[in-house]
Structures are given as C-alpha cells and as structure tokens.
Amino acid sequence: MHTSNELSELHPFKSLVTGILISSVLTLFLYAGITLSCNYLLKVTLTLLGIIIISSLIFWISLKHDYMSDLVDITSSTVAFDFRFSRSGYVASISKVLKRIIPFIGALATLSGMLLLLWALPAFIINMLTTEKNSGNYVLISVFLMSMIICTAYFFSNREQFTTVTSIISFFAGILIGIIGMNKILIRFIS
C-alpha cells in the first residue's frame, strides 16, 4: 500500500526533469522580461505601476462599497423596521460585478507587483551600471542568479518531495542544465 509521502516523493529521474523544466521556463521568462524592461524601462515601469494603482483603487472602492452596503442593511433593519432601502438596478449590478472580479483584480495587482520586482528592478540596475553594448551579458548573469535563487526557494518550499540524496542532487543538476542550456540557446538565437 502506498502512503501519501511515497506518492508525492520525486525519484531521481523525475527530480532531474522537474529541475530542467522549472529552470528552463523560468530562465526564458526572466530573460524575455528583463530584456524588454531594459529596452523600454520607463514604459514597462509606468505600465506596471499603473496596473497596480488602478487595481488597488478598484479593490479599495469595492471594500468601501461592501462596508457601506452592510451599514445600510444594518441601519435599515434596526432603526426603521418598515423602511426598505431601495437600490437601483444599476447599483446592484455594479455590486455583483465587483464581487465577482475582486479575486482577479487582487491577482492582477499581485502579479504586476511581482513583475515589477522581477523585471523592472533588475533592468533598472543593469541600465544604471552598464552601457548598452555589454548589457546583454549582465542580463544573462542576472537571469542566471535569479533563476538559481527562485529554484532554490522552490526546493526548500517543497523539501518533503526530495527525500533521498540522489533526488536532491538530480534536482540541482537539472536546474543547472536547464539554466545553462537555455542561456546557450538564447545566446545562439540572439547572435
């Protein structure tokens, strides 16, 4: 009989493949985003900040709307027993739409904040420290370091899947193979 720990544990080959897939996709994602941000730093930063601000405002308005709606319901039920606060159909429909899209608005704001940290901040540092000629090398170095850090964080957050020493070594070998392989592909593709 298999227990839940045996089902979730990764064997060495699966650990290797998991490391290669995670690091390759992450490397490609970070490289594309940081390169785009290096070329259009102001536009990317302003777009992401605008999305964060607009999403936060919609979220705040929704919270205030819910608070005022609850306050009106409590007041109408306790103070004036036969008084019914009539809402127009327009206000009720806005309330229903806001309640349905709030999780997506929160996810959009969170994703934009993460992209601001993962793409725009390294691009800003690279643009401040380098010239345009050698910025490609620094982009590759920053992508390598960030991919290693994120993949290591993935390893520690899913530590229970890697029970044997061989699966741990296979996972980190997969990470290095994925990152270095994707960097080689990107270098050949760009030059």
Image: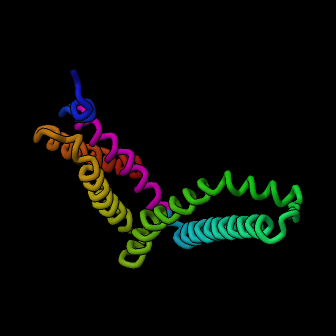
Q: Residue sitting at 46 percent across and 62 percent down?
A: 114
Instruction: Indicate the position of residue 169 as horizontal and vertical percent values.
Output: 14, 43
Front-most of residues 63 and 146: 63
Q: Position of residue 55 (x, y in %)?
A: 63, 65
- Compared across the picture, whether 106 is left or right of 63 comes to left
Q: In the image as oriented, which residue stretches furthest toward the left?
A: 165
Q: How many callouts does the rendering have?
A: 0
Span shown in magenta? 14-36
Q: For the N terminus, which image quadrant?
A: top left
Residue at x-position 22% and y-position 44%:
160
Q: Relative to residue 99, is residue 12 drawn left or right?
A: left
What is the basis of the colouring in this image? rainbow
Task: Judge left or right: residue 17 versus residue 126.
Answer: left
The residue lying toward the viewer, choosing from 105 and 67, is 67
The furthest residue to the bottom: 128
Q: Is residue 43 visible?
A: no
Is residue 157 highlighted in magenta? no
Q: Nearer the viewer, residue 20 or 84?
A: 84
Please determine whether, in this image, residue 68 is positioned above or below residue 144.
below
